Amino acid sequence: MLFQAPTQLFLCTSWFAVAVKSYHIDDSCTRAGIYQQVDDAMQSAFAMAQSGIAALATGNGMANVEANLNPARPPQLERLIKNVFAHDDIISGNTRRYKAPARDKYHMTLQNLKLYKVSRILGLVVTNMGQQTSTPGADDVTIYCDSSRLHLTEDGKSVTDADRNNLVMGSRKGDVYKCSQSNQGFAVAVTWGAPHDGDREWSAAIQLCKKTVENVKKGRFDNWGAFSRANPAALLNRVLTSTRIVPGFAQVDAFKLLDVTLLHEMTHARGAEGLNDVTVYTLISREIEAYRWLGITKLAKKLPYVEGERPTAPDNNSDSIAYFALGCHIMSDPTNPQEITDHGRLKRLSAAVQFP
Ligand SMILES: *[C@@H]1O[C@H](CO)[C@@H](O)[C@H](O)[C@H]1NC(C)=O
Ligand SMILES: [Zn+2]
């Protein structure tokens, strides 16, 4: 199961509304016996978001947008930013080569890159979703662990949600149905960022797929900290196999556990501006979503650049933001600091990276 490509479908409506304020874990997670794991993973996701915010604080606090960061970023952080967010023009300091619309606010280089949007989105996740609520309203996010509430409409084209007054949540075409059945490939989770039904707004819904629930139950898809503490042998095995056997997977992808997944999904909620799963193209022009290390590092090398508030930029891509937060978190982890190398391998650090 480790090697099936996880896909996370994002379905969003075209409008934004008031911010999400908190999260709610549906009773189905208690019934599935994984309430605590889901809650722990949420806490881990928020901790990752906090690490990302801390990593970008210096740049975001500077008055002069064009100025280089002072103090400069630690090299491990600079490498992560280079890999996940920096087009080659930014790395070479030659962004003027691309005739960017005026929305590009400054002449970006790797040394002065602020990543305002990345910081803003991670901030929204923490401030808008960081509290637990038992009564989720329109502005909140709900996590479900039971997809049997989802049903196909009679014409077989759409999926409705029995828990939400049979509201149409999305089309069958995507992974929604796969998620509920898990018979062909599987999705890890599916998120509806801003469901609404006429005037009635429903909380954003994150559905953990059947297979995901099973894997969490078995302790295989926990969260970064719990997994590495509780299961060192399995961890090693996972890391080795995920790098040698599966093409298209990098070692770090083995650590996209429930916490990184939930962080990814939360960036799709209306309270985090409803980020996208941006697509990139393979050699044969097949559209693939910019997921996992290879996908996001490929996206970073495509136009448009970050900072321009554009739909297909790396800073509007959920997985780019989630991996960035993961990378910041593990490099600054005092007990087991590691950095993500250019090729998506994990490298032990002799000391935790300190963010100024
Ligand atoms: C990000 O992607 C979403 C979903 O496609 C889109 O609605 C939104 O406008 C994009 N944001 C920016 C700033 O481009
Ligand atoms: Zn997604």
Image: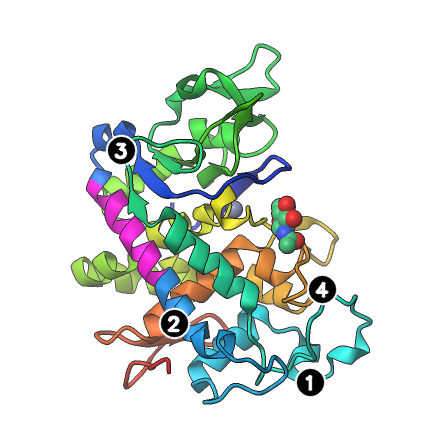
- Residue 78: mark: none
Residue type at numbered disc 2: Ala
Residue 22, x across and y down, in percent: 35, 43
Local secondary structure at mark 4: loop
Precedes in sequence: disc 3 or disc 2: 2
Residue 334, x across and y down, in percent: 24, 76
**Quadrant of res 17:** top right
Q: Which residues are magenta?
A: 36-48
Residue sitting farthest toward the top: 154
Q: What is the CA distance from the residue labelled 4 to the residue labelled 3?
A: 41 Å
Q: Which residue is mark 1?
A: 93
Precedes in sequence: disc 4 or disc 1: 1
Horizontal side of residue 41 vs 296, given as left or right: left
Q: Is residue 335 visible?
A: yes
Q: What is the CA distance from the residue labelled 3 to the residue labelled 2?
A: 29 Å
Question: Would residue 37 be counted in the magenta stretch?
Answer: yes
- Depth check, mark 4 against mark 3: the one in front is 3
Local secondary structure at mark 1: loop
Quadrant in the picture for the N terminus: top left
Precedes in sequence: disc 1 or disc 2: 2
Precedes in sequence: disc 4 or disc 3: 3
Q: Give the crowd class for mark 3: few <14, some 14-19, many >=20 residues within 10 Å.
A: few
Q: Main secondary structure of the magenta part?
A: helix
Q: What is the CA distance from the residue labelled 4 to the residue labelled 1?
A: 15 Å
Q: What is the CA distance from the residue labelled 1 to the residue labelled 3?
A: 49 Å
Q: Give the crowd class for mark 4: few <14, some 14-19, many >=20 residues within 10 Å.
A: many
Q: Which residue is mark 2?
A: 54
Labels 1 and 2 touching (C-beta < 8 A): no
- Please tell me which residue is depicted at 59% across the width and 56% down the height of the picture: 316
